[in-house]
Image (cartoon, rainbow, N blue to C red):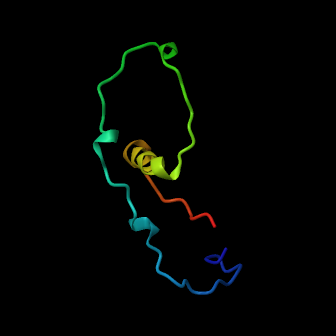
Amino acid sequence: MHRDGHILLPPPTKPANNHLKRPKPTLFTAPQPEVIKNAGAYALTVERAERETSALWNEYIDRYHYLGYTPCPAHR
């Protein structure tokens, strides 16, 4: 809305650097050999990504998602 001229925002107090933060690649997300089993042979668990595991999640997204990784805005 600011770019379109609908509202006026104050100038930023700090330079934006979110686009510079990229996950550091590790061996955890390296490609693995193909698994050939029926889908029913696996148990699926869904877990919430906590702060301790979010770096791994971000690395997977950066490596394999077609849009890549972009940081989420900070929650306050």
At 39% from the left and 48% from the top, the residue drawn is: 59
| Marker count (numbered) | 0
Residue 60, percent from left and from top = 41, 44
Residue 58 as seen in the image, left or right of residue 10: left
**Residue 35: which quarter of the image?**
top left
Q: Residue at x 43, y 72 (%)?
A: 17
x, y (%) of residue 46?
Answer: 57, 33
Between 51 and 40, the one nearer to me in the picture: 51
Task: Name the residue rendered at 40%, 63% in the picture.
Answer: 21
- Which residue is at the front of the view, 37 or 49? 49
Q: Is residue 50 above or below residue 37?
A: below
Residue drawn at (44%, 53%), measured in percent from left and top? 69
Quadrant position of the N terminus in the picture: bottom right
In the picture, measured across the screen, residue 5 lies left or right of residue 73, that is: right
Left or right? Give the position of 51 relative to 62.
Answer: right
**Residue 61, relative to residue 76: is it above or below?**
above
Residue 36 higher or lower than 47, as above or below: above
Q: From this viewpoint, which residue is outermost toward the right?
A: 6
Q: Nearer the viewer, residue 64 or 32?
A: 32
Which quadrant, please, contains the C terminus? Answer: bottom right
Q: Residue 36: x percent and y percent?
A: 37, 16
Percent of width and height locating residue 66: 43, 45
